[in-house]
Image (cartoon, rainbow, N blue to C red):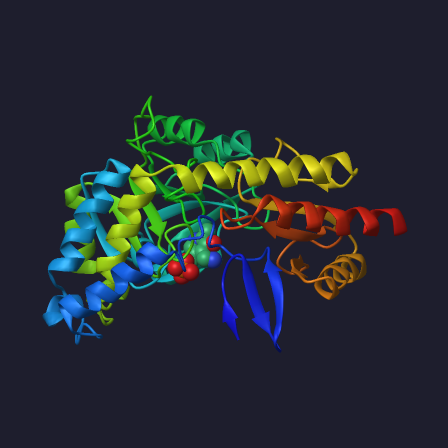
């Protein structure tokens, strides 16, 4: 019925929400809600009224794009209505049948769909298997090559190694595209000019979304001015859709600036991640997907069988905690999991309480 983080309400009952991408708790932050209302007063308009290239594009879209370029250290940026459209829009505009796309196996569905739509040859490489990627880059000759990866993987909470990917791209005359939907606005954002040392060189194409840490809705692509000019002219999901409501651009810009200047929410998020990961690990659960301890707000607890994942999620639900049981085909057979998503809006008590329930479940296994 209502709510985002820390609680959602269903049938009159409140649940502590551990399944949202509202990582910084900005979706309902009072200061941003107020800014949105002020924006409505000032702009006095809901819809943009047209697509960007007709009359929908306004000063707020422009101003947001400039702030996004600054927040990522790229030359220019372009907003899209959703992250799904941004990914499809870039890939479809840049790749064609002369392109080989090297796509990470765990990439988001919108990357998979964009690649299909582009008619490029798609070569998949295993999750974080950069030796295999290198072999594939050697093996496939194509006039154009493009590597595409998520930065933070949404079902595993793992992190791509962007410096290795950058080197591979350079060595094989390839472009690199990074989807940072689950990192943008967070302390682990890729290519943040606000975190020193600033990791140069950058990817060629950066995608970020507003529906997660930023707490609003929509997305953007950042890159060189030449790339952005090209997308304005050739990206069909940019050209043939209604521009975002101007007030959404207005409030999104404020939220982006907040994430780049005020670290208090990010600090709370990092403390909450540490609290939950440590607590679950001490109880003996398999936390994270192997190669490194969980460092992001996406915390998978691997349980294996679907029935067990569902049972655990239902037990948590009856105790007032909303946690997703993620099962095949979203993840491989035998790798069902509970996926906790932590927010800065969770209190230490919320985490202690869910840990107490997990402990009880563990004792009953
Ligand atoms: N990329 C990734 C990695 C995502 O997780 C998502 C959202 N689930 C998207 C892109 C799409 O973003 P949006 O929700 O804005 O369409």
Residue 215: % across, % down: 39, 56
> Residue 92, image x and y in percent?
31, 58
Residue located 44% across and 43% down the image: 149
Q: Is residue 86 visible to us here?
A: no
- Relative to 134, residue 144 above or below: below
- Height in image: 317 above or below 298? below
Would you say 302 lies left or right of 296 here?
right
Q: Nearer the viewer, residue 206 or 105?
A: 206
Say whether residue 189 is left or right of residue 350. left
Where is residue 348 shown, x and y percent of the image?
Answer: 60, 43
Seen at 64% across and 41% down, the residue is 276
The image quarter containing residue 317 is bottom right
Residue furthest toward the top? 197
- Assign ligand 1 to one image quadrant: bottom left
Residue 7 visible somewhere in the drawing: yes
Q: Position of residue 137 (x, y in %)?
A: 44, 35
Q: Residue at x 32, y 34 (%)?
A: 192
Quarter location, residue 257: top left
Q: Nearer the viewer, residue 26 or 82?
A: 26
Q: What is the residue that sits farthest to the right in this orientation?
A: 364
Number of marks in the image? 0
């Amino acid at each position: 019925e209502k709510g985002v983080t820390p609680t959602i309400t269903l049938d009159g009952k409140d649940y502590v929400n551990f399944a949202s991408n509202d990582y910084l708790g900005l979706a309902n932050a009072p200061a941003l809600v107020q800014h949105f209302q002020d924006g409505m007063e000032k702009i006095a308009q809901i819809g943009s009224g047209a697509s960007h290239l007709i009359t929908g594009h306004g000063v707020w879209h422009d101003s947001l794009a400039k702030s996004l370029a600054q927040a990522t250290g790229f030359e220019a940026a372009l907003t899209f209505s959703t992250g799904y459209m941004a990914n499809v829009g870039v890939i479809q505009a840049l790749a064609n049948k002369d392109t080989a796309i090297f796509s990470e196996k765990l990439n988001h569905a919108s990357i998979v769909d964009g690649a299909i739509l582009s008619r490029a040859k798609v070569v998949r490489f295993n999750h974080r298997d950069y030796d295999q990627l290198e072999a594939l880059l050697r093996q496939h000759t194509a006039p154009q090559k493009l590597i595409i990866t998520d930065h933070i993987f949404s079902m595993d909470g793992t992190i791509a190694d962007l410096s290795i990917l950058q080197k591979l791209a350079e060595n094989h005359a390839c472009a690199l595209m990074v989807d940072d939907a689950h990192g943008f606005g967070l302390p682990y954002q890729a290519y943040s000019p606000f975190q020193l040392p600033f990791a140069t060189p950058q990817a060629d194409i950066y995608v970020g979304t507003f529906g997660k840490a930023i707490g609003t809705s929509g997305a953007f692509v950042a890159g060189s001015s030449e790339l952005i000019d090209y997308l304005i002219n050739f990206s069909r999901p940019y050209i043939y859709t209604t521009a975002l409501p101007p007030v959404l651009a207005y409030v999104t810009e404020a939220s982006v600036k907040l994430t780049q200047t005020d670290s208090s929410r990010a600090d709370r998020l990092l403390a909450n991640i540490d609290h939950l990961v440590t607590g679950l690990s001490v109880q003996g659960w398999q936390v994270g997907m192997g190669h490194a301890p969980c460092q992001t707000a996406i915390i998978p607890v691997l349980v294996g069988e679907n029935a067990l994942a569902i049972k655990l999620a239902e037990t948590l639900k009856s105790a007032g905690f909303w946690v997703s049981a993620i099962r095949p085909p979203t993840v491989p057979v035998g790798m069902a999991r509970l996926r906790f998503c932590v927010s800065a809006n969770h209190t230490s008590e919320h985490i202690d309480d869910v840990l107490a329930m997990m402990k009880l479940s563990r004792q009953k296994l």
